[in-house]
Image (cartoon, rainbow, N blue to C red):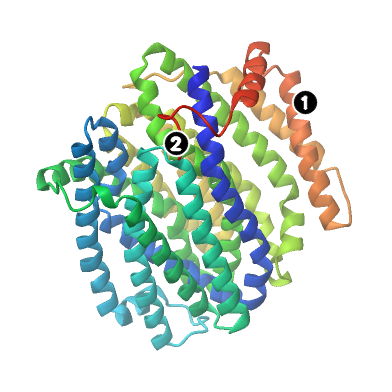
Amino acid sequence: MKQDFKILIRHFITYGASIYLSKLIGFFMIPVYTAYLTPADYGVLELLDLTMYVVNMFVGLGLINSIIRFYSDCKTDGEKSEVISTAFFYVLLAAICINGVLIAFSGPISRLIFSSREATASPEQLSFFVKLVACSGILDILAGVGTAYLQSEKKSIIFTLVSIARFIIAVTLNIVFVVGFELGVVGVLYSQIIAAAFACITMTWLMHRHLGRHISSARAMEMVHYGAPLIISSLSMFIIHFADRFFLERLSGLTVLGIYSLSYKLAMVLPALLYGPFEMIWNAQMFDLYKKGEDGHKTINYVNKYMLVGSLWFITAYALCIKDLVYVMADPKYHEAYKAVPPLLLAFLFTGLTTTSTVGIMFAKKTIYRGLANIYGAIVALIGYYFLIRAYGYWGAVISTFLALFVRYIAGVYYSQRFYKIDYSPVLLIKVAIAAGAAYGLGTMISIDNHIVSLFIRGMAGLALFGVLALGLKIFNRYELAAIVSLIKAVRFRGKANDSAG
């Protein structure tokens, strides 16, 4: 079990390096974006990104979601080449066909997406924006095949280097186009398409030895059969996370949408910094643990516990300093964005818990149940968006998102427990909730006029208070504490060849 945690932590740190760097640079870019883009412009970009997200879900045909699962079952290089090559060329064909339609009918599609009169761009410009994101989408989806390949091979260092390079290219070009040439929205889109081209070319080269051989229609159908329910699952997650933007655009306008989008982006730091790098290694590692029987089962139970504790620890500290962060980083017209972040963080907690609590669905290859859980959440979300956004604006979106993710989590756990039991402790849940609530309550008593100083002090206080309360409530026993200290000391970026990231 100790060795399993070493692998998880080492790859978590490696995968996380690129995400942490991108988020760090992204925070420093917030003053630039909020100064040179109006909230309405921000809303336009949000809707364009979401449109491409939906399109790429169907372009992937479920194949990208299937790569890691099928690659882990391969015993020969020939079988591995068949999985990668089949996925790449079928996705390429689908991307050209579907995004080609998007480009051909960009005018009607742009009018369907944008109904608010607040849009600062002309109908012709909005149509051009759709064409740009469609081209970027083709490149992104092909790069996604390469990402799945690197995850399957556990090449976390290579993934990190490519991701960092892509992000630096995007940020540099954003500064050139948005600040230097003052191109606004189109400048951001130019940056995205160039960065996506870099990622696509690099990823294709990295897996070139697998391409062009062993393309199998039978394998493609098998992968689609496995991944198709995940398309429904992904679409449902899109509804939960992002469909509120379309309701907000029509019921509240692009300005409110832009402010809410910044709130959401700031709250998404939790999934990005913790869940993102964790899932990149967990999606492959959990199958190795499953094969280890009882020892692997114990490790999975511990991972589920630490996901809960670690998430609430982070949420407590981040929620305490979010107002100061927004006031320091964003233009005054965006300052209201901080209000929605803490409740959104609590909503996203269920996203992380779902990752570790529903492994039984994946082990049993019953992905239909993950789809069902997501559908339940999506139904709750749509009902909430329709009624609550109309009545309460973006707060209706916040409440609906929380309820949807909670329902999704409960349903997923219910189904997963049929195939693979995870241990749950109500006492642990109560203790962690008390630690988080008490630490946050005490932290709010700290009042400092200087936002930069307050940002640091309140954040550190949140971390310290939660840690002290966790020890006092005995959330970790002495054996766990000793094991955690040992693991931290033992984690290195170098390991055995079969666990190496490079």
Of 167 and 439, which appears nearest the observer?
167
Q: Residue furthest left?
A: 218
Which element carries disc 1, helix, strand or loop?
A: helix
Crowd around label 2: few <14 · some 14–19 · many ≥20 (10 Å):
many
Residue at 69 percent of width and 72 percent of height: 333
Query: How far across and how far down the image is residue 66, in percent?
Result: 27, 42
Amino acid on which disc 2 is placed: Ile
Q: What is the distance, in whole Å, between disc 1 and disc 2 at their CAs?
A: 30 Å
**Nearer the observer, disc 1 or disc 2?**
2
Q: Is residue 453 left or right of residue 291?
A: right
Judge the density around disc 1: few (<14), some (14-19), many (≥20) Cα neighbours within 10 Å.
Answer: few
Mark linked to residue 281:
2
Amino acid type, mark 1: Val
- Looking at the image, is mark 1 or mark 2 earlier in the sequence? 2
- Which residue is rendered at x = 38% and y = 44% of the image? 150
Q: Secondary structure at mark 2?
A: helix
Whether residue 235 is visible here, answered yes or no, is: no
Q: Which mark is residue 149?
A: none
| Residue with the mark numbered 1 | 468
Q: Residue at x 64, y 11 (%)?
A: 479
247 relative to 465 in the view: left or right: left
- Is 243 rendered above or below residue 132? above
Where residue 465 sits: x, y (%)?
78, 32
Mark yes or no: residue 348 visible. yes
Vertical placement of 188 versus 147: above or below? below
Question: Where residue 44 sits: x, y (%)?
Answer: 49, 73
Q: State the residue in front, 70 or 468.
A: 70
The residue at the point 76 percent across, 38 percent down is 462
Quadrant of res 482: top right
